[in-house]
Image: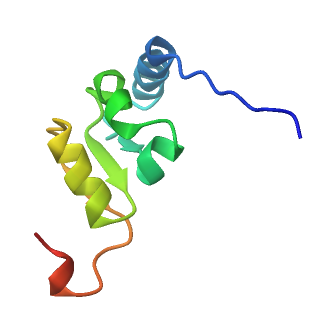
Amino acid sequence: MRPAHAVIDLAALRHNLARARAAAPGARAIAIVKADGYGHGAARLLPALADADMLGVACIEEALALRAAGATQPVLLLEGVFSADELP
């Protein structure tokens, strides 16, 4: 198997978000960063996604990690919680 390597260009990510906003004026943008930014480090993506209206994650642990990393946008919990014991 060949080794795989992904490079995340934060300037390109910021640019793509701006282009999506320009294509849909007035629409809200939700940046989905579940699974730790699909394995690329959600906290590291936050500066490039600062203009997103909301962040989307799969579970409460991911939402709490984003808050701990300084995210200020609302966080959409895509999966929800299964019991009150999961809540902080």
The color scheme shown is: rainbow
Q: How many marks?
A: 0
Lateral position of residue 72 relative to residue 48, left or right: left
Relative to 85, is 14 on the left or the right? Answer: right
Judge from the rendering whether residue 61 lies leftward or rightward of residue 87; answer left or right.
right
Residue 71, image quadrant: top left
Residue 40 as seen in the image, left or right of residue 82:
right
Question: What's the residue at 26%, 27% (across, down)?
Answer: 50
Does residue 59 sit above or below 37 in this rendering? below
Outermost residue to the right: 1
Task: Residue 9: give x, y in percent of width and height.
Answer: 52, 16
> Viewer-proximal residue, 38 or 15?
38
Q: Is residue 58 visible?
A: yes
**Residue, x 79% and y 32% (percent of image)?**
3
Q: Position of residue 19 (x, y in %)?
A: 47, 20
- Please, is residue 8 above or below residue 87 in the view? above
